[in-house]
Image: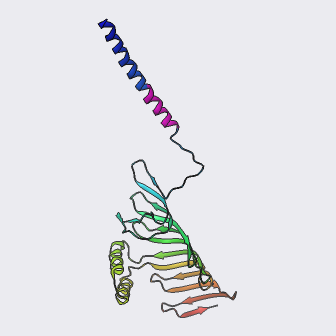
Amino acid sequence: MENKLIKEVKFLKLYSIILTLAVVFLIYQNYNKNEIQKFKEISVERINIKEKNGDLKLVISNSEMQHTGVINGEELPKRERPAGLIFFNTVGDECGGLVYGGNEQEAALVLSVDKFRDDQVMQLQYIEDTKNNDRKYGLQLWDYPIEDSYNERFKNYTALQAAETQEEKVKIIKALKEKHLLAENRLFIGKTFKKDVGLFINDSYGNPRIKIYIDENNIAKFELLDEKGNIVDQK
């Protein structure tokens, strides 16, 4: 009798092990088969796209949960950002994005490309003052006169945000301009707020130098300007 019980216990143990392995195998197989999920509709506030090692590559988010951004390895302080897509490169820095928004006062949709370890240098943009029906859209290029100047520029931006008076803000902006730390507008191709449509080229300090455009009265114009903005040649 005792031997019979021992045999039955051994059988139950073996049966339990086999059954457990079978269940684990079925779960594993089912997991692999359903690795790619299909949905007709999904509602989320934010999606993070990551590499296998966890590196962040893309954030798709509403405005409230939007990523603050990373430049030169440092995450930027909490700030308001529009809904859209934010791209990240292989070193973890933000390298561009697509953001948009619109209300009864203003509307915009911009696709930006950032300089490596720095801020934006190229943008396909649509910007509108919806209240006054004024709009600008086209291709915009910027330049930073001094290479690798982001860290120093960011310190000044932090001081600018902390400034309590308009005088302090103007003083900081003037210092940034004199040190050539601000991004300079180099080129715009498109339609301006003045309703001019054409090509507008600036020098490395942001001074307008060449304008080829058609104004709001359908008059074609070509202008060459000096550093002070005076027209030296026109047609």
Image quadrant in which you'd find residue 115:
bottom left
The picture places residue 207, in percent across and down from the top left corner, at 49, 86
Image quadrant in which you'd find residue 149:
bottom left
Q: Nearer the viewer, residue 188 or 170?
A: 170
The picture places residue 90, in percent across and down from the top left corner, at 41, 57
Q: Nearer the viewer, residue 175 or 50?
A: 50
> Considering the image in quadrants, where does the N terminus appear?
top left
**Which residues, given as a range, are shown in magenta?**
22-33
Q: Nearer the viewer, residue 217 or 179?
A: 217
Residue 140 visible in the snapshot? yes
Residue 109 sits inside the magenta stretch: no
**Could you tell me which residue is drawn at 54 percent across and 81 percent down?**
201
Q: Is residue 27 left or right of residue 218?
A: left
Principal secondary structure, stretch drawn in magenta:
helix
Image quadrant in which you'd find residue 171:
bottom left
Residue 109 visible in the snapshot? no
**Could you tell me which residue is drawn at 34 percent across and 14 percent down?**
10
Q: Residue furthest right?
A: 218
Q: How is the image coloured?
A: rainbow
**Could you tell me which residue is drawn at 36 percent across and 90 percent down?**
167
The picture places residue 191, in percent across and down from the top left corner, at 61, 80
> Considering the image in quadrants, where does the C terminus appear?
bottom right
